[in-house]
Image (cartoon, rainbow, N blue to C red):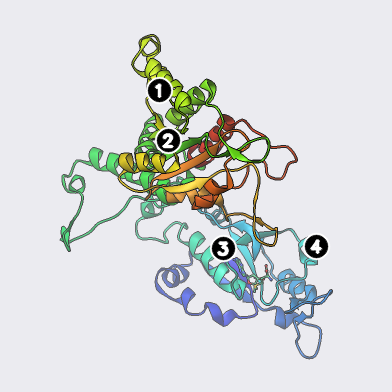
Amino acid sequence: MHYHIVTLFPEWFSSPLNTALFAKANEAGIVTVDYINPRDFTKNKHKKVDDSPYGGGPGMVLMAQPLMDAIASIPKQGRLIALTPAGTPLSQKLAEELAREGDLTLICGRYEGFDERIYDLLPIERVSVGEAILNGGEVAALALIEATARLQDGYMGKNESGTEESFTQNLLEYPHYTRPENFMGLEVPKVLQNGNHQEINAWRREQALAMTLRHRPDLLARAELSEQDRIRLNTLRTLSFAKNIHIALVHHPVLLKSNMAGSSSVTNLDIHDISRIACTYGLSSLQIITPILDQKILVEELITHWTKGDGAKTNPDRAKALSLAQLADSMDDAIENVAKISGTKPILVGTSAKAEKDKRGREKRLAAPFPKIAELDKENSILLVFGTSHGLAPEVLAKCDYILPPLRYMGHYNHLPVRSACAIILDRLLGDIY
Ligand code: SAM
């Protein structure tokens, strides 16, 4: 692989590209590097490569001419790649694709970046190394060089060490251990010491799935999963995360048509459907909150019919779902029920069709709300609070630790039935990966 690095600071690369495996591979001719400095191509006597931005603002912009001429001076450019925060994120897949090329020209920005017209004039691809701003493209180019160079034949001692790593199959790698067997009271997993490679491989696959589910669940959408992997993942997720989530269906205090707080009536449909939703997503309980005596009697009767009575005999599937339903007098009562099941006081996550506003009338919204809540439920129990009638009364929302943004908050109409909102929210938190 021949790397052509277009940079104002060639000296930046001298240590990393003259050290360890890269230096050896360079000596062996597996990788070569040359530097092209746009400053050598300026047409002004001060060798200026940058100028102030049109439209004003801070910083300087790299002029198109020295860059274009620097690139044009490379006899065999291969793919042209600008390192820029606006690029495609560097991934193992992209590294594998680029590693198959014979030549790569890497264009490193500085200051505020390049005059945009270079992208109109040349077939330049943009690559980023993450959602953080670096001072220049050199560090980004180094990341790309290292990721592609180590995939060249003969670069690494054992070629296979490159094929089993994190990201190669869109899974994170399983954990590694080395001597001693016991370190500060922590033992190496027994399975790794028994010499049974079938068992070791099965354990490693399961650990890779668990690591990915815990740290980078987004990768699973692109991973190649066998039927057995899916079963393992589902078990892991249901056992470890979903069981921490509970639902509260609040009938008091809720907002009524008059916009006053009051009580709504329980409905058969909500109780059935939300129990089924809770069961589908592997939750631990559905708390049905009403302080009204005749409503409580109705709920008790309904739950008993479907979990212990004739309903259970004719429809055991429904019995399973309804067995998650529990009656509670109030929010506090529901919180206590959840604490009894989970062993910890739950974090309260409210839901609303209207966006929360701050004192200045601006909409308050959590950054990345669904991933944030999904992250919480790995360690804590969570009570997702849903209101009936016209939604949760302000006093309930005020008690919540977090409030999820309304579904379809950008539209003009978002009056979803509570059971639909419940299904959508749970799917965003725990939905299957396709
Ligand atoms: N004003 C630019 C912006 O907000 O997108 C950032 C310019 S940055 C200070 C200077 C140069 O560093 C960029 O032109 C680019 O070459 C490089 N750079 C900075 N962050 C990068 C990243 N995350 N990935 C790749 N290159 C990056």
Q: CA distance from mark 1 to mark 4?
A: 73 Å
Q: Position of residue 296 (x, y in %)?
A: 44, 26
Count neighbours of disc 1 (C-alpha within 10 A) and say few if under 14, some if 14 to 19, many if 20 or more: some
Decide if ligand 1 comes within 8 Å of the CB at mark 3.
yes
How far is disc 2 from disc 4 in space, using C-alphas?
A: 69 Å
Residue indicated by mark 4: 121
The residue carrying mark 2 has its beta carbon less than 8 Å from ligand 1: no
Q: Note whether residue 168 is visible.
A: no
Q: Earlier in the sequence, mark 1 or mark 3?
A: 3
Q: Earlier in the sequence, mark 2 or mark 4?
A: 4
- Closer to the camera, 67 or 230? 230
Q: Which residue is mark 1?
A: 300
Placement of the N terminus among the 4 image quadrants: bottom right
Disc 1 + disc 4, Cβ < 8 Å: no
User: What residue appears at the point 57 percent right and 65 percent down from the top-left corner?
Assistant: 2
Whichever of labels 1 and 2 marks the residue nearer the N terminus, that label is 1
Three-letter residue code for mark 4: Leu
Dividing the image into four quarters, tell me where ligand 1 lies. bottom right
Instruction: From the image, tell me which residue sits under label 3.
Output: 129
Q: Secondary structure at mark 4?
A: helix
Q: Between marks 3 and 2, how big is the CA–CA gap?
A: 53 Å
The answer to the question of whether label 2 and label 4 lie on touching residues, with beta carbons closer than 8 A, is: no
**What type is the residue that disc 3 sits on?**
Val
Tell me, for residue 329, which label it has, or none: 2
